[in-house]
Image (spheres, helix red, strand yellow):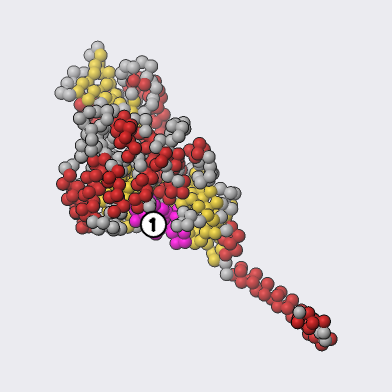
Amino acid sequence: MCSNLKGRHISAKGVALRNNNKKYMKKLFFIITLSFLFASCVNKTSVDLIIKGATVYTIDSSFTIAEAIAVKDGKITATGSSADMLKNYEAKETIDAAGKFIYPGFIDAHAHFVGYGLGLQTVNLVGTESWEDILHHLGDAGKTMDTAAWLIGRGWDQNDWPVKEFPNKEKLDAMFPNRPVFITRVDGHAAIANQKAMDLAGVQPGTSLTGGQVETKNGKLTGILIDNAVDLVSAKIPPHTIAQIKTALLAAQQNCFAVGLTTVDDCGLDYDAILFIDSLQKAGDLKMRIYAMLSDNKKNFDFISSKGKIKTDNLTVRSFKVYADGALGSRGACLLQPYNDKPGWSGFLLSPATHFDSVAAVIYKMGFQMCTHAIGDSGNRVILQAYARQLKGKNDLRWRIEHAQVVNPNDLRLFGENNIVASVQPTHATSDMYWAGNRLGPERVKNAYAYNDLLKQNGWLPLGTDFPVEDISPFKTFYAAVVRKDARGFPADGFQPENALTRQDALRGMTIWAAKANFEENEKGSLEKGKFADFIILDQDLLKTAAEKILQTKVITTFINGKKVFNANNTNGN
Ligand SMILES: [Zn+2]
């Protein structure tokens, strides 16, 4: 009211002043705009890389989703909207992700990286359909693998062939007259060797031994070796050379990058293998980050007790891998009650229970992490109780039980009460579901692969694969964890779906929770300022894509330290 009155009675002098003010304000506005533009140019922070136009799942504590990411010196500088990143940062390289999806690089919390790499240097004959099929595989492999070395294969089974008889080595000799070839049957109890291998092992027609057979026909070696005769030839295979191990690790690394893995836990290595990994990483050949667990043997304890923990950007060594029992499939897992399909048999512990107590005491004193393979409910109980005796309640030592496959419901609380970490592999659930009920019976199987029950204990749960026991693909882990079906969609309702994880939790299990299981959550596992720029670009949104399409997810690019290490369009990563 008042201002309206004033406005009506404004003087001529006042009008002149107001016009002057207007001019002044225009000038001021022009200067401010100029200086702002100038300032925004010079004040932009320079970074190495900006990726814009993506859906960025940061996997931070509030599950923030961003559009863009800025990287400098191998670390994450910032995440945010594309507009903000471009406004605040000037990059040497800018990539438009064109709407694709960015996640932290996957971490496999339980694998056997070295074993997988060495396995890649042998010919996989699982599922071969005939002797001719095997020869075909060997012929292909012979061209690419180190031609001076033994050609080794494994996994054939004549029961899968139309003619279910052992073959004869004649064609093998013709293909490989000068190179030893040795291929073992799927169960390891039989093998086929060519003449060159037989010669190197000194095996001749008439060679006899107890507990084995060297097969002959018409006085000639057929190439078939049964039981202990297998060892006559396998004992002559030279140990891997340094060059072969290097080739194996680099091949393993390339396959891992192609499925989005940027860190893997190698569960059980000797210290010399770990030192070799360290040397390859320091030389820049091996870019894969490794969390290495030492195997439970005296030379490793002796080595590390003088050396202490090992920590570089690429390698962490601060844990021991111990075995409580065997596997459920072969009925080696130690159960509280006999197997449902083998009355009177409960499996067994691989060491006396006192061993676990004494090892736990040593590891506790060293301030190391203990990681124990336990499958059966008895194996898990023995280890949980041995851990509890050392840990005595809440702690941050993150002692792990690897697999935690069958856990008696009465023992679940021991995980939470002592902050014991269950390190689980969701594909084991969907690989074993066809026969796990036979082993355990309809009631006890409900206590198996109980990932949701285990998650509730500590509120976090690291996930892995156990490759090469399972496939290396993290997408198979994700699918098995959230859908609990096989690739064909069986069973229709999922296997014990009450223990499926949510998509968010499965992703956390493959990133930040896996990092936490390795004491590395402050440097990796999420896309946050200051962490390693280890991330992947995927063609699908794992949070939203239809369940039946999850397994088709492809990695477009994998980055470690902000550098491309895999590019789907160029497998050299450049
Ligand atoms: Zn394993």
Q: Label 1: how many residues lie within 10 Å, few (<14), some (14-19) or many (20+)? A: some
Q: Is residue 523 magenta?
A: yes
Q: Residue at x 55, y 51 (%)?
A: 55
Q: Is residue 533 visible?
A: no
* Spot occupied by residue 125 in the image (x, y as percentages of width and height): 36, 28
Task: Residue 443: name its quadrant.
Answer: top left
Name the magenta segment's main secondary structure. loop
Q: In which quadrant of the rendered image does the N terminus lie?
A: bottom right
Q: Residue at x 24, y 16 (%)?
A: 216
The three-letter amino acid code for the residue at tag 1 is Glu
Horizontal arrangement in the rendering, residue 18 relative to residue 378 (left or right): right
* Spot occupied by residue 471 in the image (x, y as percentages of width and height): 39, 37
Residue placed under numbered mark 1 in the picture: 521
Q: Is residue 397 magenta?
A: no
Q: Residue at x 20, y 39 (%)?
A: 349
Q: Is residue 82 visible?
A: yes
Horizontal arrangement in the rendering, residue 104 relative to residue 12 (left or right): left
* Spot occupied by residue 259 in the image (x, y as percentages of width and height): 45, 43
Magenta highlight range = 512-534
Q: Secondary structure at mark 1?
A: loop
Task: Residue 425: name its quadrant.
Answer: top left
Q: Nearer the viewer, residue 395 or 184?
A: 395
State whether residue 259 is above or below residue 528.
above
Q: Is mark 1 within 8 Å of ligand 1?
A: no
Task: Residue 376: name its quadrant.
Answer: top left
